[in-house]
Image: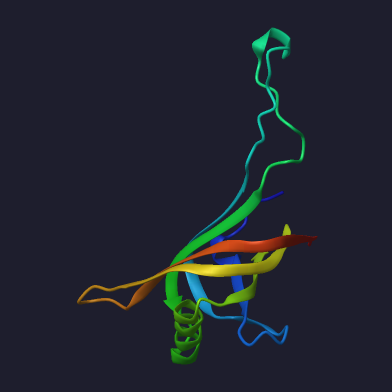
């Protein structure tokens, strides 16, 4: 697979819960991470006293973080309200030529910053709040 432009990775939000996905912000830097907990089932009879893990038993999660600028005032207001209301919303991460990760996320961090000679930027973090799906491109 050839290298992909980072700017082509999109973050979309179902703003109202209707199922209609809208790109809400321009992300300049972003990260999507998947994690899985483990369940240790090691006991005195474990071969060579090596740790043994139970297959498929750990809790899975995904986290998304990004920085950038909001597309417009309405998008900023929507995301800010979702944060203050503590709502779970459907989000999509579109990874070019790879696929789409979709599911419920909670907005856990929303930070604003700026310099005297630049635009206002934001930092956003999301944590998965249920099962996620992956649809290949």
Q: Residue at x 66, y 49 (%)?
A: 60
> Which of 23/126 is in front?
126
User: According to the image, what is the colour scheme of the structure?
Assistant: rainbow
Q: Quadrant of residue 133?
A: bottom right
Q: Residue furthest bottom?
A: 74
Above-or-below relation of 18 to 66 = below
Above-or-below relation of 107 to 2 = below
Q: Residue furthest front?
A: 44
Q: Quadrant of residue 118?
A: bottom left
In percent of width and height, residue 105 lies at 60, 68
Is residue 3 in view?
A: no
In percent of width and height, residue 17 lies at 67, 84
Is residue 60 in view?
A: yes
Q: Quadrant of the C terminus?
A: bottom right
In percent of width and height, residue 121 lies at 36, 74
> Which of 94/59 is in front?
59
Above-or-below relation of 71 to 101 = below
User: Would you say 45 lies left or right of 12 here?
Assistant: right
User: Would you say 18 lies left or right of 30 here?
Assistant: right
Q: Residue at x 73, y 12 (%)?
A: 45
Q: Residue at x 72, y 14 (%)?
A: 46
Q: Residue furthest right?
A: 136
Above-or-below relation of 109 to 54 = below
> Which of 88/93 is in front?
88
In percent of width and height, residue 12 lies at 62, 75
């Amino acid at each position: 697979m050839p290298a992909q432009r980072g700017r082509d990775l999109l973050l979309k939000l179902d703003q109202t819960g209707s199922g209609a996905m809208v790109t809400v912000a321009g992300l300049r830097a972003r990260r999507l991470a998947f994690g899985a907990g483990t369940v240790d089932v090691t006991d005195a009879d474990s071969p060579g006293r090596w740790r043994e893990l139970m297959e498929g038993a750990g809790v899975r999660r995904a986290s998304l973080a990004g920085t950038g600028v909001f597309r417009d005032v309405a998008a900023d207001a929507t995301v800010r309200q979702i944060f203050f209301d503590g709502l779970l919303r459907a989000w999509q991460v579109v990874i070019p030529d790879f696929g789409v990760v979709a599911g419920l996320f909670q907005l856990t961090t929303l930070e604003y910053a700026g310099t005297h000679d630049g635009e206002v930027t934001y930092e956003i973090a999301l944590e998965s709040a249920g099962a996620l799906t992956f649809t290949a491109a």
